[in-house]
Amino acid sequence: MPVESLGQVLILLTVSVLLVSAGSRIGLPPLLGYLIVGILLGPFAFAVLPNGSQTRAIADIGVVFLLFTLGLEFSFPRMVAMRREVFGLGSAQTLIVGGAGAVAAHALGISWPSATVIGGALSMCSTAIVLKQLGDQDEINRTHGRLSFAVLLFQDLAFVPLLALAGVLAAGQSAFTAASVWRLVGLGLFALAAVLAIGRWVLRPLLYLIAHSRLREVFTLAALLVVLTSAWITQRLGLSMALGAFLAGMMFAETEYRHQIEAVIRPFRELLLGLFFISVGMLLDLRLLQARFLSIFGLLAIMVAAKTLLSALTTRAFVPNGFKALRTGLVLAGGGEFGVALLTLLARDRDLLPARAAQLLLATVVLGMIVSPLIIRYNRRIARWLLRETAPPRTAVQREDLAAIELARREHVIMCGFGRVGRNLARVLESQGFEYLAMDLDPVNVRAAREAGEPVFWGDSADEELLRNLGVDVATVIIITFADPAVAIGVVRAVRRLRSDVPVLVRTQDDSRLADLSQAGATEIVPETFEASLTLVSQALTLLQLPTAQVARVVDTLRAQRYATLRTQPTAARPEQDIEPAELLRSVVLPPQAWAVGRQLEEVRAHGAEVSFTAIRRQGITGREPAWDTQLREGDVVVIYGLPTALEHAEAVLLTG
């Protein structure tokens, strides 16, 4: 008998931690670990977890959060620039793969209406599995990742009429009416307008007020409200919850709150996505798999091979070579949760789909979801093997990682934090011929820096193992650029536990923890406010015509006294002022239909892109500080720097003009 609820949660957490950790150590995707947990604890194995509607509903919210955060990275201008891929490739792939499945089902004696639903079910892929795995592999912005996402987005739209057709058949009706078709189209347009209107005129002003109230927990609640409200609106109108969440995320990508919203949503997304993958594993009936082993694996092989081939052939018209087309086909080869929903609806009536055929198809689609992470993980190797191509010596990412490993073995600077201050320091070090390695916990900063070819790694700077890997034993200087002194103290202590003689330079915003930083082992501490004061003192004394040597002595004395003179006067308490938005780094990938493709940077700037163009990455090679006459090409990664509002406008210019 199943154990009580708290026991279920404890068993679920224990098995998940053990299996996901063990899988990661041997190189398996975390998704596969969650799927195995679902298989073992589901109703068809040890029956620890109930396969109820509440569990599936909570798990589906994980997909909603995934699509919302993806929408935050996928702005409306980029959507417009990719309209050819979404509606061209997406519709072609869905129609061709779904049509082939429908013809095969009809050839086996199933009526055309039911065969159409079966074909659509087999054409569907799991948005959650594909995008999560591509994101983990940092392949979302690669050609095959971008095209796969376009197909998945169209499939979310195509699921609505397929679900309606399945509902009509299950209710015993014979066909659609023109009125029902127009009703679906009208609901879809109304859902889009409702999400955009509520976001612009209600939620966006609400977030503005909350952000300026400085209440973090209220901002978190408001972010959850944004996600779930948009998903609820589209669900009530008969559309996909995930589609509504994606539209809301895409809308908020145009605002200055995108990074903060993503930060507060990410913990909920990861937790609920894990539950979603566990719920998928619970669908696999091990007894049926054992009894129909050859039939199910035969159908699985046919489905994967057919979807790969047909998707690759369809994609070939959108890419320059067969290798990228085949990688896209492999990414889209697995099954999807929408397919499970359609087949489950058909299976309720044996006249529409015989029970044995329904069981075999359901098992095949679920197993296709389970093997999908592995296929995506090794899509490059599989494509090379199928095309009998010899792989290049190393990818750009592999070359950069190997270069970083070599750099960690010789003298270099370690920078902890790669925000605005860290990037400025990096430019100066680079210009003077000094090598550096950097780390940061902000995934947005790290991704943008990596795409620009910077030797930056994601991780906690206070992690001793990470410091060892980045060569703290041979580093000449450690520079800590975090504004929070508590974080800096933790990093200094971690460095001193590993090495006592390396100079540690710390930047802080003020003097609140100078003594603590010195006690922790910091060699030099640079408070921003006092250094700005010293600069003003130096300029003022120079304008008062004091000799340069005397000005230098005054400044040096103040520094030697640890800014004691500047700290003697107490400052009156004042209310917090609004914090000005910080300048950020962003990478924009140019799809084929982008406005900037074929144009020079000077034209882009003249068109209203008021940002700094810090680098252009092309075919794995990064060019820093590009000239104004540089001509942009399809697939370029353009690295821009500026205020959030300027970045949003510049991205819109690059993509749509």
Image: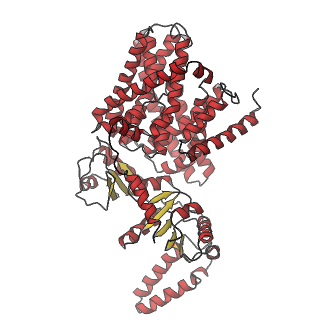
Q: Is residue 587 left or right of residue 474?
A: left
* Relative vertical location of residue 400 with respect to residue 571 in this rendering, above or below: above
Whether 285 is drawn above or below 9: the answer is above
Residue drawn at x 56%, y 59% is 460
Q: Quadrant of residue 274?
A: top right
- Its colouring scheme is secondary structure
476 is higher (above) or lower (below) than 208: below
| Residue 164 percent across, percent down from the top left | 48, 17
In this orientation, does residue 586 appear?
no
Can I make out residue 212 in this image?
A: yes
Q: How many marks?
A: 0
Tell me the quarter of the picture where residue 265 sits.
top right
Residue found at x 44% / y 31%: 192
- Residue drawn at point x = 53 percent, y = 15 percent: 358
Horizontal side of residue 610 vs 358, given as left or right: left
**Can you give x and y, in whole percent of width and height, for residue 488 in the image?**
58, 67
Q: Position of residue 532 (x, y in %)?
A: 48, 75
Answer left or right for 367 relative to 119. right
Residue 256, image x and y in percent?
A: 46, 51
Of the pair 345 and 379, the residue shown nearer to us: 379
Classify the position of the C terminus by image quarter.
top left
Residue closest to the eye, 397 or 509: 397
The image quadrant that residue 428 belongs to is bottom left
Depth check: 529 or 171 in front? 171
Quadrant where the N terminus is found in the figure: top right
The one of 65 and 218 positioned closer to us in this rendering:
65
